[in-house]
Image (cartoon, helix red, strand yellow):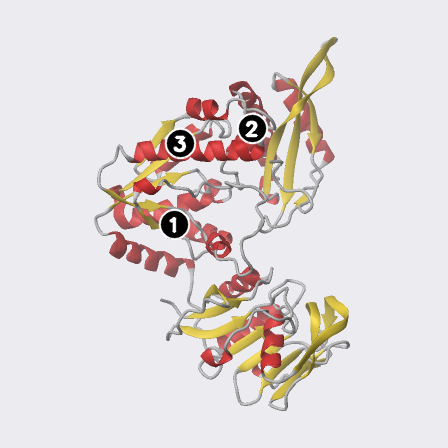
Amino acid sequence: MPQQILILDFGSQYTQLIARRVRELNVYCEIHPFNKIPALSADIKGVILSGSPCSVRDQGSPDVDLSLFEDKIPVLGVCYGAQLIAHKKGGTVMASTSREYGRAKLTKVDHHNELLKEISLDTQVWMSHADTIKAVPDSFEIISSTPSVDVAAYRVKGKQVYGIQFHPEVTHTLQGKELLRNFVVHICGCAQDWTADQFVESTVANLKQKLGNDKVVMALSGGVDSTVAAILVHKAIGKNLHCIFVDNGLLRKNEFEQVLDSYKHMGLNIKGVDAKDKFYTALNGHTDPEVKRKAIGKTFIDVFDEESHLLTDVKWLGQGTIYPDVIESVSVMGPSVTIKSHHNVGGLPAKMKLKVVEPLNTLFKDEVRVVGKTLGIDPLILGRHPFPGPGLGIRILGDITAEKVRILQEVDSIFISSLRNAGLYDKVWQAGAILLPVQSVGVMGDERTYEQVVSLRAVTSTDGMTADWAHLPYEFLANVSSDIINKVKGVNRVVYDISSKPPATIEWE
C-alpha cells in the first residue's frame, strides 16, 4: 500500500472534498466512518477528523478514542473534529451566539507554527459551524484567530495534534490547499508520489496476482468508469476478460454501433447484445418513474445473466464502481433518503455466485479520467457527459414506445452535435433532451399541427451534487430549436429548462 492519510468521517457534507484535496497533493487517502476505524499500519502517516452536522454537546454525538492515534501519528481536527478534541481535553465548546457561516479573515496567524507556514495574515477562510470553542485547556496554544472567533486554530503543546475551526477543503478558503500541504507533506511527512502512472502500474500488478488465469465477465456502458475499469483488467488478463455491451433500446442515436466499434479498436474481447425488444416489452404500459427504472434494471440483469451463462468457467464479475459509491454505501449517519433508484445497475442475481473485482473503487471521478488519459483512452470517451443507467427511459416522461425513442434520439442527436460544433460541449457538465407527455398546437406549412413538446436540459457542475442551468447563448438555442422542429417529425415545440439543482434534479425522472 502507498503512504496514506486516514480521514475519519463524522457525517460532514465536505468529507469527500477533504479527500479530493489531499489527493490533489499526490498523496493517497481513505475515508472511514468514525466508528469503523481500521488498524493503524506503517502506511498511515496521519489522521484528519472531519466536520459534522452534530454538536459535541449532544448526547450520543459521534465520538472517537483519541488515544488510538494521538501519540502515534499527527492529527488534524476540522470544525467538529477540532471541537471534539478540545471538548475531550477539557476545553469549553458552546453554542455560537449567532451561526458563524461564510467568509472570515484570519487576523492572527502564528507563522512559527508548521501548520500555518506561508499562510497570509488576513487570508480568507470559510466558516460553517453552530458551536464555538470558547476556551481551550492550558495544554493548548491558540495559533490563529478571526475578528469573531478567538480559537480559529490551535495546537496541543508538545504534540502533533491540531484543530482548525474553518474548512480548508472548500475553495472559499483561499489558502486551504497550502494548509493541507503543510499538514500532509511537512508534518506527516508523506511523499507526493501517488500519481496516475503509479496507480496503473500497481493496480495492473495487483489484478494479475488476484485474478491469475481466471475469467472475468463485465458489462460495459460506453461510459468513463466501466471503460477505464475494463482496460485495467484487460491489461492484467487479456482475452480472459469477457465484456458484454447491451443495447437496451434506450441509448443515444447510433450509440450501440459506435461504442461497440470503439471498444473493438481498444482490443477488448466484447460481445454486443441487441435486447431492445425485451426492454420495450418490460416497459410496456408503465409510466411511473420508479417502476420504469426497476423494469429496466431487472431486464438488464436478466439479459446479462443469460449472456454470462453462455460463457464457461467465469469466476469474477468486473465492475466500474468508484470511490463515492463505496463511501456512500457505508454512510455514517445511516442510509440516505431515496431520491431515485437504479442510477446505475449494481444488482446481480445471487445464483451467479461470482466474486467481484472493482479496480476503480479507490478513485474519484476526476481521478478516473486522469487514469484513463494515462491509459491512452480516446478523449471522446473520457470527456463524455454522464448518462443515466436507464438511458432515455427516464427522459421520456410517461410510457415508452419505439416511436417515442426514435423521436428523442433524433432530438438528442441534434442538441449534442450542435453543442460540439459550437464548442460548448466541454463547457457543460451534462446535456440532454426530455420528451414531455404533452402535445402542443402549432402551424407548419399553413396547416395546423398537434405534436410533441421537447425540453432541452444543460447544466454546469463540478460533481453533479449541485448544478446550475447552463446559460447557453440565445442564438445557439434559437438555431437548435429551429433544427429540431424542421428535422424531427413529430415535434413542433422546444423549451429550455432553467432550473438549478437543488431544488430540481438534473434528470426529470
Q: Label 1 vs label 3: CA separation? A: 24 Å
Instruction: Report the mark closest to the observer, 3 or 2.
Output: 3
Which one is nearer the viewer's eye here, 142 or 82? 82
How crowded pointer 1 is (Cα within 10 Å; few <14, some 14-19, many 20+) is rated as some
Q: Residue furthest front?
A: 59
Instruction: Report the mark closest to the observer, 1 or 3.
Output: 3
Q: Which residue is mark 2?
A: 413
Q: Is residue 256 visible?
A: yes
Q: Are marks 1 and 3 in contact (CB under 8 Å)?
A: no
Identity, as a three-letter code, of the amino acid under mark 1: Leu
Which one is nearer the viewer's eye here, 342 or 405? 342
**Mark 1 falls on what kind of element?**
loop
Residue 509 in the image: state x and y as whole percent.
Answer: 60, 36
Image-based side of 235 in relation to 438, left or right: left
**Mark 2 falls on what kind of element?**
helix
Which quadrant: the N terminus? bottom left
Vertical side of 463 occupied by 479: above or below: above
Residue 332 in the image: state x and y as whole percent.
Answer: 53, 61
Q: Label 2 vs label 1: CA separation? A: 29 Å
| First in sequence: mark 2 vs mark 1 | 1
Residue 306 in the image: state x and y as whole percent.
Answer: 32, 31
How crowded pointer 3 is (Cα within 10 Å; few <14, some 14-19, many 20+) is rated as many
Q: Which residue is mark 3?
A: 246
Q: Are marks 2 and 1 in contact (CB under 8 Å)?
A: no
Which one is nearer the viewer's eye here, 363 or 381? 363
Q: Residue at x 26, y 32 (%)?
A: 310
Instruction: Report the mark closest to the observer, 2 or 1.
Output: 2
Vertical side of 242 occupied by 282: above or below: above
Q: Residue at x 37, y 74 (%)?
A: 41
Q: Which residue is mark 1?
A: 375
